[in-house]
Image (spheres, grey):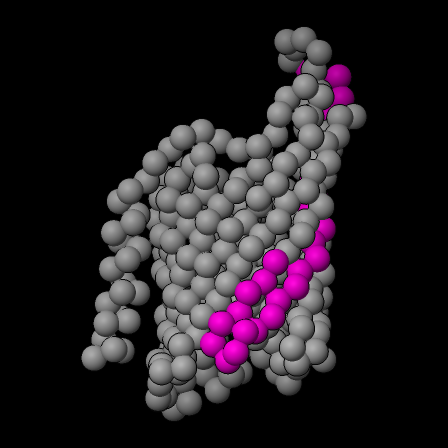
Amino acid sequence: MRQKLILLFLFILPAYLSGSSLTAGETGMAFLKLGVSGRAVGMAEAYTAIADDASATYWNPAGLAQLNSAELMFTQNQWLQDVRHNFFALAFGTKSHHFGLSFISNTVDGIERRTKPSTEPIGTFEAHELAVGLSYAKMIGNSFGFGVTLKYLYERIYIESSPGAAVDLGCLYSPAWLAGFRMGAVLQNLGKMSDLQEDPIELPTAMRAGVAYSLPGSISGARLLIATDVAKIFKSTYHANLGMEVDFRRIISLRCGYQTGWDEKGLNGGFGFRYSRYAVDYGFTPFTRDLGSSHRISLNVRF
């Protein structure tokens, strides 16, 4: 009966909350909202309760406490309009204390520069954004974990720049009475940026909560993982994400998912391949209105 109630919760909660979308303005530093990890994107970013690799430094720092070994991750994101978005993370620690280092960079080239209305620009310039994070996580008992990420932020547009700082706070709960079930929550980007010239920059502060359940039993060595997230980006909208992963003998994984609350995207998909201590994951997000598609490729190495 407990398992049936959990599955019901997984499917009904996103549908309920996605009907509560509110739009209340926009924020700056939008690159902080671009998800990392091919696996997470393939599951429609329903990853708050799953994050069990180095990408936990982005999704939920408490997830670092689930790692049993050191891990190195790199994600290359082929984003829209030739935007270059890259993620790097290193996770390591002891049996009781877990740490993570992360780096996110975002670059936009070829922005046309004009000083007055004209058919031809007088030149072009670039915009750069980055986030450097230090994470810590710890388990309390066998079921509850918490984590924190401290981030240095920086934005530069043409000759103007703005530094800042933020913090992420996350928790994770795995009840002992039901193996394979996890709940997670995280507050992201709590902080402040200095003004860019004279314009204030408001961070995309967000709250995420999710659950994940790995179904017991298998068919020909296959394992099914179902996850759902509800994300509220303050000053913006609610988003409900539902993702699934079918893992075949921990070698090949197929993934799909759906995101609500976005006008230009919804479906996501991807796959992964693991061999020994190496893993490659791919996540695909198609966009409407002729915007194109996003492709994320991740490489993980565990030591």
Please provide percent x and percent y for residue 134.
70, 57
Residue 222 visible in this rendered orientation of the protein: yes
Please provide percent x and percent y for residue 86.
67, 52
Residue 297 visible in this rendered orientation of the protein: no
Please provide percent x and percent y for residue 41.
49, 59
Q: Is residue 197 above or below residue 128?
A: above
Near-viewer residue (115 or 209) = 209
In the rendered image, residue 133 lying in the magenta stretch gets the answer yes
In the rendered image, which quarter is residue 88 located in? bottom right
Name the residue rendered at 67%, 52% in the picture. Answer: 150
Name the residue rendered at 61%, 76% in the picture. Answer: 67
Span of residues in magenta: 120-148
Please provide percent x and percent y for residue 37.
57, 61
The quadrant the C terminus occupies is bottom right
In the rendered image, residue 80 lying in the magenta stretch gets the answer no
Determine whether, in the image, residue 229 is placed left or right of residue 98: left
Determine whether, in the image, residue 76 is placed left or right of residue 246: right
Near-viewer residue (37 or 180) = 180
Name the residue rendered at 28%, 71% in the picture. Answer: 6
